[in-house]
Amino acid sequence: MKKLAILASLLVAFHSFAATQLQWEDLRPDVSNIKDPFMELSRDQLFDLGRIARLDMKETLTEEEQLERKSLNDDLESQGIDVEYLFGIRAAVSEQRRIAATVPKASLNGEKVRVPGFITPIQFDDNKITQFFIVPSGGACVHTPPPPPNQIILVDYPQGYELTSMYTPVWIEGTLNVEANVQDVMYSDGANGIESAYTMDADKIEIYTVQ
């Protein structure tokens, strides 16, 4: 009986310290589910909608511009698009997009987590990286624009990791912190002033395997 109690306590302790496996979508905040009808519009429809918006910003319209606005509005309406409704919700949709792209999930602060991703190096000690970004896609921030801030984790790994390729996926495990950070870095064909919404004190780095 005593052995069972000890085993039970060890299992509880193990689960208490086990890392929670996350996917990148888990790092986004929970936002109210506002439908984004703009995603359903074609490029031409978005262009026409934008033209109407630009005309509406003018204090006065010429007769030609008034006719143009009416023509654009009627054409969109004939396609089943409610122009006034879209203009009415665009501020709410824009705010939802901003939150989804930039705001971290506060409940993850201080959690021990395990995240898959790709390494973008920042600092080296000899041939090992000691500080880097972990990002959802290989080459992000270097060969492609940076992901949104809540899709970038700034990782410290003092013992260093020998990186063979930025296109080799890895598992990163450690304590995740909700902490905004801007790293003023410059790559050969990348960006500087890269924003991240999270930092991590990493305990372990492993080559990615499906789990």
Image: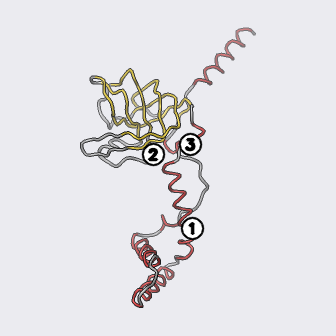
Mark 3 residue element:
loop
- Identify residue for label 2: 149
- Identify residue for label 1: 89
Side (left or right) of 32 relative to 52: right
Q: Which mark is residue 105?
A: 3
Mark 1 nearby-residue class (10 Å; few <14, some 14–19, many ≥20): some
Side (left or right) of 45 relative to 184: right
Q: Estimate the x, y position of residue 190 in percent, counting from the top left.
A: 29, 45
- Which comes before the other along the chain, label 3 or label 1? 1
Mark 1 residue element:
helix
- What separation in Å lies between label 2 and label 1 (alpha carbons)? 25 Å
Tell me the kind of residue under disc 1: Ile
Tell me the kind of residue under disc 2: Pro
- What separation in Å lies between label 3 and label 1 (alpha carbons)? 25 Å
Mark 3 nearby-residue class (10 Å; few <14, some 14–19, many ≥20): some
Mark 2 nearby-residue class (10 Å; few <14, some 14–19, many ≥20): many
Tell me the kind of residue under disc 3: Lys
Height in image: 104 above or below 60?
A: above
Query: Contact (CB < 8 A) between labels 2 and 1?
Result: no
Q: Quadrant of residue 1?
A: top right
Mark 2 residue element:
helix
Query: Contact (CB < 8 A) between labels 3 and 1?
Result: no
Which residue occupies 41% across, 86% down? 65
